[in-house]
Amino acid sequence: MQRILLIEDDPSGRDIAVANLEEGGFAVDAAATGREGLARLDLEQHALVVTDVQLPDTTGLELVRQIRRMTTELPIIVITAYPSVDLAVAAMRAGDRKSVV
């Protein structure tokens, strides 16, 4: 069973996402903050990270950058309730394997 790390600060959104992912056959570790998510991240166990853009202690884009410094292989999905083209471009650039330093 593949394990997903979900980082979402909204309790009801997190609960719904966890239920849907588990119903889809995934094991889910959930975190409410970026700090908690990074602490729970296990590069050996997690097959995917899903993070909200707006978190109480950081942004999802900063999390993408931090995770990319650890690994360029782990897929990351950035979600938001407030989509924009600029945000989508920023998220893609943050996760670009060629731009990791």
Image (cartoon, rainbow, N blue to C red):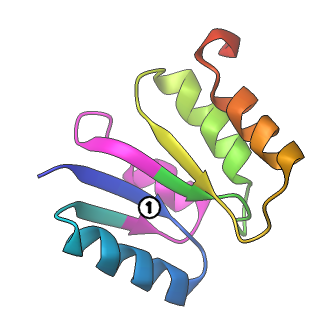
Instruction: Please tell me in which quadrant of the rendered image residue 83 appears.
Output: bottom right
Q: Position of residue 4 (x, y in %)?
A: 32, 54
Residue at the (76%, 44%) spot, across then down = 88
Q: In the image, is 14 to the left or to the right of 52?
A: left
Residue at the (88%, 44%) spot, across then down = 86
| Membership of 31 in magenta stretch | yes
Q: Residue furthest left?
A: 1
Amino acid on which the number 1 mark rests in the picture: Leu
Q: Residues within 10 Å of mark 1 (few under 14, many from 20)?
A: many
Q: In the image, is 91 to the left or to the right of 1?
A: right
Please tell me whether residue 71 is drawn above or below residue 49 in the rendered image: above
Residue ID for mark 1: 6
Please tell me whether residue 76 is drawn above or below residue 16 in the rendered image: above
Quarter placement of the C terminus: top right
Regarding mark 1 in the picture, which secondary structure is present there? strand
Q: Position of residue 70 (x, y in %)?
A: 49, 25
Please tell me whether residue 13 is drawn above or below residue 91 in the rendered image: below
Please tell me whether residue 64 is drawn above or below residue 72 in the rendered image: below
In the rendered structure, which segment of residues is drawn in magenta? 30-49
